[in-house]
Image: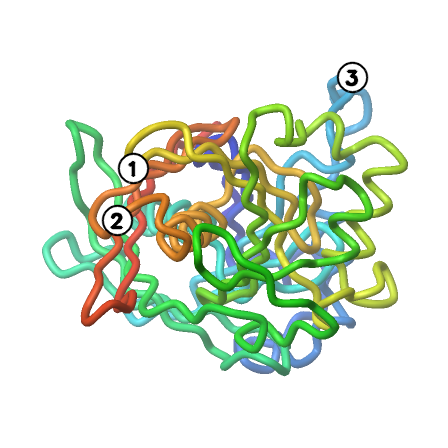
Amino acid sequence: MTQIYDARGNIYIVVAPDAVRDSGIDMPEQAELAAQTRENWTLAAIEAFCGWVPGTQPPGSKDHRSDGLLVGPFQSAPPYDLLIVNTDGTFAERSGNGLTIFSQSLSEQGLMPKETGCLLRVHHDKTDAVSPGETTVKPAEVDGVQGFWLDLGKPSLGPQAVGAHGVESVQLNGRDVSHVQPLSALEPAWDRSQFVRIGNPHCVTLVASVAALPSNEQMREPPLAEGLMRIAYAMPTGAGEPCPSGVNVQWAMLESAQQVVARVFERGEGPTASSGTSASAVACAAWRVGWVTAGEVKVVMPGGTAPILLEEVDGELSRVRLFGTARLMG
């Protein structure tokens, strides 16, 4: 089975493990072993399933027809293992839109328990995060839209949460945040950032005006593209500064009460229309500096708006949930 889905402009291709092997790619049968042997098969899988058919690539589009590949499920009943493969062949520890798409695919195959939902286990090869990373998903309806609530758990905040080095502590609204010199060197307005780990690492730069939000088109053009790759991507593709394992980069601006506008540059992918975990990290960063309170926060990205639920206990974020929807593209 191979299907392509859209979740708020974030596009993933879902492919069954057997389909990967049937294409002639030597991928192990167990998700854990497949994650440990990434360099042997992921680039071939991206080329086989995410490449454009000759003559079909729209002008100005990305080099691949999707933002990545979702390989799974590896079982016929929950909990389900899967792999999230970026188009550069690396793994993501978690993707909100990816897990939403995978949940939609499971539902269409009759594999998603409608009442209870299920546990998804994402395997990866990162050394600074637990593998597999677990996310509970449950079918739901919000404002008449069918989708899924993803329980992303408790976030961690600050440089230590993402392994950031060489960053200075500064203040925004009386709260300690970080000054990331490689970012402010690209644009002086990018001088206040909040690090968040919510399954995977994020660096949310908080800005005061729309003019300081980069467009996806700007992020694809040099020299900005090269500068952001050095920050977001680990070596050898980037420099891993300030996070040696790389970091997802976002920009956020408070638009109105409980609503934040965001842009996203993903580690392993580059600028993207939306990202569920990025939206969740943006909501956490906005809470940290007092822009929003616990409860529902809406994060507006070029690909759509993501509802986030923040739960707070004794002045700390205790849980983050993301609502996602996805549609089959054909």
Q: Is residue 310 above or below residue 97?
A: below
- For this orientation, the residue located farthest to the front is 174
Residue 309's disc is: none
Sequence order check, earlier mark of 2 and 3: 3
Q: CB atoms at circles 2 and 1 under 8 Å apart? A: yes
Category of crowding for the residue at label 2, using alpha-carbon neighbours closer than 10 angstroms: few (below 14), some (14–19), many (at least 20): some
Determine whether the residue tagged by mark 3 lies in a helix, strand or loop.
loop
Residue marked by disc 3: 59
Q: CB atoms at circles 2 and 3 under 8 Å apart? A: no
Q: Is residue 269 above or below residue 126?
A: above
Q: Position of residue 17 (x, y in %)?
A: 54, 63
User: Which three-letter amino acid code belongs to the residue tagged 2?
Assistant: Thr
Q: How is the image coloured?
A: rainbow
User: Which three-letter amino acid code belongs to the residue tagged 3?
Assistant: Pro
Q: Could you give the CA–CA distance between mark 3 and mark 1, rounded to whole angstroms? A: 37 Å
Sequence order check, earlier mark of 3 and 1: 3
Of the pair 254 and 82, the residue shown nearer to us: 254
Q: Position of residue 200 (x, y in %)?
A: 53, 65
Say whether residue 191 is left or right of residue 103.
right
**Residue drawn at 44 percent across, 73 percent down:** 133
Q: Could you give the CA–CA distance between mark 2 and mark 1, rounded to whole angstroms? A: 7 Å
